[in-house]
Amino acid sequence: MKTLLEAVPPELHRGPAAVDAVVAHVAAVHADFPLDGVNIPEIHEEPSRSSKGERHKPFAPRMAPRELAYVIQEQLGVPCMINRVVVTTPADQLVDWANETWERYGINQFVLVGGGLSNQAYVGPSVTQANQLLREHAAIDALRIGNICIPSRDGEVARLQAKTDAGADFFTTQILYEADDLQAVLTGLDETSGPTPDDLWVALCPARTLRNIRFLLWLGVNIPDALEAWLIEAPDEVLERSLAQIKRVWQSLSQDRAARIRPALGINLAPIGAIPTDVTVGLAKELAAI
């Protein structure tokens, strides 16, 4: 089983010590559970995607993902993939940015992300168009292109196939707390004749507090009401219950995995809040055992 660890770029005002803290956390996890890579999101100010959630902390500018990736790769030797919102960058500038990221930062894995508002006109290409642009015009050795999979979205199988046909190698899912929607997507890929990505990284997110759960809901993570109520029923048990639910999700996804050649399923661990390193490592080992 391949495993990624998600590392969020620190807020700029926190200075070099915050960068060191992120790198130290990655190093500590990697020392006890060797990682296949680090996935670094691009954080932007954005509106809530759900009326159920809330965000307590205001947005603050953060370190650029490629800068954090460079430090991690140089200091730890762990390969990184960085997320990039493509719709806000004109097409020619996107290709230049990707080439520069390879030449100056040594990064050749990109997760291309679309816009958060369906009713807004953007200056840049769609994700499908961006896949094709980089595949055809970027001068990057061993280029790997990823996109986001939202299993609960209508027509997701067709979207994955169109994006794969345009050049995507892999997908990372939205954070999952249930397996059903992704199982339906995987079944749809099995039953159709279109292209299938090489890899699909399943994003799993341990949460420690009610506040963490509310923030996940704000992000648009699909947590049914009954499951939400169970997760937060006992405030001191949120972490324990989130870990138990994550293991149930991975168990369900793993049951039919042996019969599927593509996409290969991997795990993208995306802890939220102050999750101790030993908890992250312990979860990774338990999921690997499953």
Image: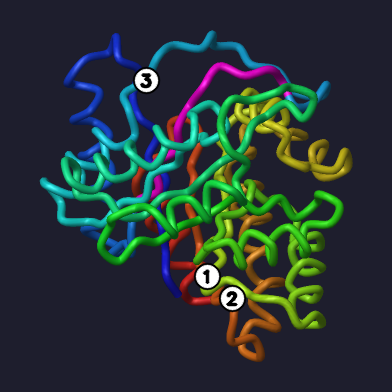
Decide if residue 8 is on the left or right side of residue 163: left
User: How far from the left and from the top, in percent, is residue 121?
Assistant: 70, 23
Residue 178's tag is none
Q: Nearer the viewer, residue 12 or 213?
A: 12
Q: Which residue is mark 1?
A: 199
Check residue 166 for magenta coloring: no
Q: Nearer the viewer, residue 282 or 38?
A: 38
Q: Secondary structure at mark 3?
A: loop
Check residue 41 for magenta coloring: yes
The residue sitting at 59% across, 87% down in the picture is 261
- Mark 1–mark 3 CB contact (< 8 Å): no
User: Mark 3: which amino acid?
Assistant: Arg
> Which quadrant would residue 95 be assigned to in this image?
top left
Q: Which residue is mark 3?
A: 62
User: Mark 2: which amino acid?
Assistant: Pro
How many marks the image carries: the answer is 3
- Mark 2–mark 1 CB contact (< 8 Å): yes
User: How far from the left and from the top, in percent, is residue 131?
Assistant: 52, 53
Residue 174 against residue 289 in the figure, above or below: above
For marks 3 and 2 on the same chain, the one whose residue lies earlier in the sequence = 3
Decide if residue 276 is on the left or right side of residue 141: right
Q: Which residue is mark 2?
A: 263
Q: Nearer the viewer, residue 117 or 97?
A: 97
Q: Which residues are magenta?
A: 38-48
Q: How would you rate the neighbour count of disc 3 (Cα within 10 Å): few for under 14, some for 14-19, many for 20 or more?
A: some
